[in-house]
């Protein structure tokens, strides 16, 4: 890719059912539309996977789970930064969309292949996903669940799938803190923590914003975010369709609309007020180092 000023790349990280694939499809719609912080001036050579995700969204369906046996289908291309201090900069976006098993194995086994470590060290930013309402959410142990676990046969008690979600998220942040951007100069690595399905969170809980939601639901992970080490981190809430497509009324409304205009991102502005934008490229842009717009 000639003519690129800075080679920056962003990595997607998240467990099962965390919203990664659906976000990639909606992100591509935003990049192709070209009216957000990031745009794609030309199509990448291979976008079949992303186009499949887009087709699912346009038909009012969420994408199924990614089943790649640990391999990545890379969403990759040249992106033009259209706002903030990096306006006019061309950068390479690489989003490896991998099955959640890879990251969950990393958390449970405490090891990762050298080639993946190399990829992470060459990335300048990452998106770490968690999804409200995920059926794969595993709550932290309390006195009740601990007592039940003690009565469970050992072989069942140590199932890898039973790692508490906030422990998994903390492990992933530790991994990124250790390796993200290590091979890059003059770039402070950033992690966008993405709370997917933000529209499904009760309105009274939405008012306080994504980080407050993380504090309530994943207190240990929130504490690790506050002690972020060499990383910059920021929480975002995302809705790729503006509501739940399982709800027939919303699905009918969505199908009658333009999918490229649906969905939104929320985040906390510098003044502490919540900002809501329809630009789904914002979490990626921030991870690349782009300044974000404040509330109007």
Image (spheres, rainbow, N blue to C red):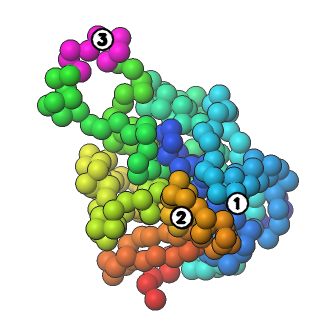
Residue at horizontal 46 percent and vertical 89 percent from the top: 296
Magenta-drawn stretch, dominant element (helix, strand or loop) = helix
Q: Secondary structure at mark 2?
A: helix
Q: Which image quarter holds the N terminus?
A: bottom right
Q: Is residue 232 visible?
A: no
Query: What is the C-alpha distance between the residues marked 1 and 3?
Result: 46 Å
Q: Which residue is mark 3?
A: 154
The magenta segment: 149-157
Q: Is residue 96 above or below residue 215?
A: above
Let me know if residue 29 is in the magenta part.
no
> Which residue is most to the left?
143
Residue at horizontal 58 percent and vertical 28 percent from the top: 113
Residue at horizontal 37 percent and vertical 28 percent from the top: 162
Indicate which disc, 1 or 3, sits on the residue closer to the N terminus: 1
Measured from the top left, where is residue 211 in percent x and y? Answer: 33, 61
Which of 5/161 is in front? 161
Which of the 4 image quarters holds residue 71? Answer: top right
Which of 111/198 is in front? 198
Task: Identify the mark at residue 58; answer none if there is no mark.
Answer: 1
Indicate which disc, 2 or 1, sits on the residue closer to the N terminus: 1
Q: Is residue 175 above or below residue 151?
A: below
Dots 2 and 1: beta carbons under 8 Å?
A: no
Q: Is residue 221 left or right of residue 27?
A: left
Q: Is residue 263 left or right of residue 110?
A: right
Q: Which residue is mark 2?
A: 249
Which of the 4 image quarters holds residue 269? Answer: bottom left
Measured from the top left, where is residue 66 in percent x and y? Answer: 63, 38
Q: Is residue 206 left or right of residue 254?
A: left
């Amino acid at each position: 890719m000639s003519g690129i000023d800075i080679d920056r790349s962003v990595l997607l990280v998240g467990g099962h059912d965390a919203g990664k694939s659906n976000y990639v499809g909606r992100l591509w719609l935003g990049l192709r539309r070209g009216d957000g912080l990031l745009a794609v001036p030309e199509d990448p050579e291979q976008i079949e996977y992303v186009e499949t995700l887009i087709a699912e969204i346009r038909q009012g369906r969420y994408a199924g789970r990614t089943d790649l046996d640990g391999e990545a289908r890379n969403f990759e291309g040249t992106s033009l930064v259209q706002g903030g201090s990096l306006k006019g900069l061309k950068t390479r976006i690489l989003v490896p969309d991998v099955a959640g098993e890879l990251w969950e194995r990393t958390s449970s086994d405490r090891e990762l292949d050298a080639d993946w470590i190399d990829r992470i060290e060459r990335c300048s930013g990452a998106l770490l996903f968690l999804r409200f309402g995920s059926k794969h959410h595993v709550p932290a142990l309390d006195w009740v669940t601990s007592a039940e676990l003690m009565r469970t046969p050992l072989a069942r008690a140590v199932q890898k799938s039973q790692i508490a979600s906030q422990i998994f998220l903390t492990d992933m942040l530790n991994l990124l803190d250790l390796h993200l951007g290590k091979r890059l100069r003059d770039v402070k690595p950033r992690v966008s923590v993405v709370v997917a399905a933000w529209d499904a969170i009760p309105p009274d809980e939405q008012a306080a914003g994504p980080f407050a939601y993380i504090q309530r639901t994943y207190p240990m992970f929130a504490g690790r975010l506050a002690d972020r080490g060499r990383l910059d981190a920021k929480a975002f809430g995302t809705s790729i369709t503006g509501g739940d497509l399982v709800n027939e009324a919303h699905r009918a409304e969505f199908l009658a609309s333009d999918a490229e205009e649906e969905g939104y991102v929320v985040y906390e502005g510098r003044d502490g007020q919540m900002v809501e934008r329809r630009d789904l490229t914002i979490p990626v842009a921030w991870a690349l180092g782009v300044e974000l717009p404040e509330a109007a």
